[in-house]
Amino acid sequence: MFYRFSVSFLRLLVTIFNRYIVVGEDKIPQKGGAIVVCNHKYYQDPILVGCSCLRRRFYFVAKKELFRFFWFGLLIRSLGAFPVNRERVDRDTIRTCTQLLQKGNLVLIFAEGTRNKDPHVDILPLKTGFAFLANRAKVPVIPMYITKAENVFQYRIPKKKIYVHIGEPIPWNQPLRKLVQTTQNALYALCIEGKEEYHENQQ
């Protein structure tokens, strides 16, 4: 209940401040587990992913440092976050992800491994962890790309456009390296699509 209310409220805020455009929401299955792999440039990216499909709940992996502050940690846990230790193989996180996926949930992973702070690089090379989890839980990978997500809660006229492009689910049953490369290629394709639509509609 709290999750649905919070995400609906956040989507309302996002649409008040921006022209929030989701392309391909129908690519997210009505039910069943899947890993959502998205690019990550801004702190508000998890919000934009969660708002992209209100009919499904997203769980997401967040760096453990975010849980150091009790009330903030409690808040993001209630919104579906769970911690990961990025400095080593985190068996607890692997177990949690696998259980969530096998129970039919969506798990968001920012597979670049960190926030991309380079304005000249669209997507960093993906880490292999998401592919391992997809194989382990036997669930597809759904690529997602967010375009122009800076200053989401800053009002301006005309409203700034934010695009979320969602790609076709990628089957899990393939070699890990191939799954990583296929996902990387899908993200690049969504990136190009997002940029083209953004610039076309700016004219």
Image: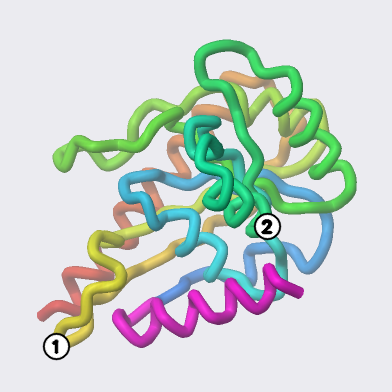
Q: Is residue 9 above or below residue 146?
A: below
Inspect the magenta stretch and tell me whether residue 36 lies in it.
Answer: no
Q: In the figure, residue 137 lies in which quadrant?
A: top right
Q: Quadrant of the C terminus?
A: bottom left
Could you tell me if residue 5 is visible in this image?
yes
Q: How many marks?
A: 2
Q: Which residues are magenta?
A: 1-20
Q: Quadrant of the N terminus?
A: bottom right
Percent of width and height locating residue 44? 39, 57
Inspect the magenta stretch and tell me whether residue 6 lies in it.
Answer: yes
Percent of width and height locating residue 48? 46, 64
Residue at 75% x, 24% y: name it: 92
**Residue of label 2:** 78
Residue at the far right: name it: 103
Residue at 63% x, 51% y: name it: 74
Task: Give the residue type at disc 2.
Answer: Ser
Query: Which SS does the magenta portion mostly show?
Result: helix
> Could you say which is closer to the camera, residue 79 or residue 171?
79
What numbered label is drawn on residue 94?
A: none
Q: Horizontally, is 9 left or right of 196 in the view?
A: right
Percent of width and height locating residue 152? 30, 68
Percent of width and height locating residue 54? 64, 74
**Contact, mark 2 vs mark 1 (Cβ under 8 Å):** no
Disc 2 to disc 1, how far (Cα)? 34 Å
Q: In the figure, residue 155 lies in which quadrant?
A: bottom left
Task: Give the residue type at disc 1.
Answer: Ile
**Pointer 1 local density, CA inside 10 Å: few below 14, some 14–19, many at least 20:** few
Q: Secondary structure at mark 1?
A: loop
**Pointer 2 local density, CA inside 10 Å: few below 14, some 14–19, many at least 20:** some
What numbered label is drawn on residue 157?
A: 1
